């Protein structure tokens, strides 16, 4: 059966998929906010990235003795947008582990008519929505209080939007694959933070990847996160951006972001399918864990 909306046609299955996606996103928001009001949760979700940015700022000011530098803007923008990776990896992983261990509903969701991948994407969208709000607030406060060289009228919003969409696809893919690998363990809470912490080091969020040791620098150069961070800074800070890839143009960095995102999604999809198949064989989805 096909239903038409304007000039577009949707099958009944397609409508159910979109409804399921919206329902899983709303569920993810409610669970991650502990069923509180949106305003209270927004304040809570913003406090951590703001506090992290302020701590790094104080450390920076002490080390540099207050001397002006473009590195401060590098630090604040990286910290602000890192909330997407933090929520997309650790927050998402903990949410799915809670579904299995605390609420014991994951096995029922797994066999529901809605494709399980759609449910996972919906839960990830809920996590990224909270991260988006905190990133906007941190950047806004940083621009006002720390006088970051960000001019909303001159920023390249198109480049920023394209870079973020590509990065979101990579983050969701990594989060889904990583979460299903964690289901193999009985007590894996906290491992999401460890995974996010590893990516924090090699993403270029707080320092250029060029200062990393050779093998880590090579791994970082294969990750889409470093190119995403670079384009975020170039689009917001323009000529004032501290560049990790000064020899590359914006188009060159974008091409590398596209290529690394495609590679990440493909690898993550293979890992997810393998972990999903093994999880069904070993009964990881409905495994009883201690709380």
Image: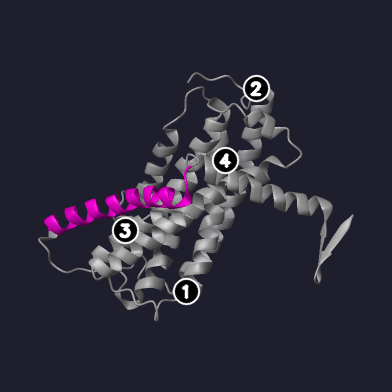
Residue 157 marker: 1
* Whole-number angstrom distance, CA of label 4 to CA of label 3: 27 Å
Q: In the image shown, does 108 or 264 lie closer to the viewer?
A: 108
The residue furthest left is 65
Residue 209 marker: none
At mark 4, the secondary structure is helix
* Whole-number angstrom distance, CA of label 3 to CA of label 1: 23 Å
Asked whether the residues under the numbered discs 2 and 1 touch, taking CB atoms below 8 Å apart as contact, a structural biologist would say no
User: Does any portion of residue 143 appear in the rendered image?
Assistant: yes
Q: Residues within 10 Å of mark 1 (few under 14, many from 20)?
A: some
Q: Residue at x 73, y 50 (%)?
A: 17
Give whichever of discs 1 and 4 has the lower sequence position.
1
Q: Residues within 10 Å of mark 3 (few under 14, many from 20)?
A: many
Q: Which residues are magenta?
A: 36-63
Give whichever of discs 2 and 3 has the lower sequence position.
3
Pointer 4 residue = 177
Asked whether the residues under the numbered discs 2 and 3 touch, taking CB atoms below 8 Å apart as contact, a structural biologist would say no
248 falls in the magenta region: no
Q: Can you tell which of label 2 and label 3 is closer to the viewer?
A: 2
Q: Judge whether 279 appears above or below 115 on screen.
A: above
Horizontal relation, residue 240 to residue 222: left or right: left
Asked whether the residues under the numbered discs 1 and 4 touch, taking CB atoms below 8 Å apart as contact, a structural biologist would say no
The quadrant in which the N terminus is found is: bottom right
Q: Can you tell which of label 3 and label 1 is closer to the viewer?
A: 1
Q: Can you tell which of label 1 and label 4 is closer to the viewer?
A: 1
Q: Position of residue 22 (x, y in %)?
A: 65, 51
Pointer 2 residue = 282
At mark 1, the secondary structure is helix
Q: Can you tell which of label 2 and label 1 is closer to the viewer?
A: 1
User: Does any portion of residue 219 appear in the rendered image?
Assistant: no
Pointer 3 residue = 208
Give whichever of discs 2 and 4 has the lower sequence position.
4
């Amino acid at each position: 059966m096909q239903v038409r909306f304007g000039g577009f046609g949707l099958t009944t299955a397609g409508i159910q998929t979109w409804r399921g996606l919206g329902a899983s996103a709303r569920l993810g928001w409610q669970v991650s906010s502990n069923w509180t009001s949106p305003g209270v949760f927004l304040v809570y979700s913003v406090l951590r990235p703001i506090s992290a940015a302020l701590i790094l700022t104080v450390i920076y000011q002490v080390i540099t003795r207050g001397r002006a530098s473009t590195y401060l803007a590098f630090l604040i923008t990286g910290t602000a947008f890192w909330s997407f990776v933090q929520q997309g990896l650790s927050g998402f992983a903990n949410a799915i582990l809670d579904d299995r261990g605390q609420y014991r509903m994951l096995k029922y969701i797994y066999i529901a008519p809605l494709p399980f991948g759609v449910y996972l994407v919906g839960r990830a969208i809920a996590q990224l929505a909270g991260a988006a709000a905190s990133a906007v607030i941190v950047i806004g406060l940083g621009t006002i209080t720390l006088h970051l060289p960000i001019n909303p009228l001159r920023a390249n919003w198109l480049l920023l939007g394209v870079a973020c969409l590509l990065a979101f696809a990579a983050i969701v893919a990594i989060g889904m694959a990583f979460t299903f690998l964690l289901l193999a363990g009985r007590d894996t809470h906290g491992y999401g933070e460890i995974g996010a912490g590893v990516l924090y080091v090699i993403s270029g969020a707080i320092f250029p990847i060029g200062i990393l040791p050779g093998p880590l620098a090579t791994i970082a150069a294969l990750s889409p996160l470093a190119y995403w961070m670079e384009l975020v800074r170039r689009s917001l800070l323009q000529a004032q951006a501290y560049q990790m890839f000064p020899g590359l143009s914006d188009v060159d960095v974008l091409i590398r972001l596209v290529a690394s995102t495609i590679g990440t999604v493909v690898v993550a999809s293979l890992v997810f399918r393998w972990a999903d198949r093994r999880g069904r064989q070993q009964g990881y989805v409905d495994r009883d864990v201690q709380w």
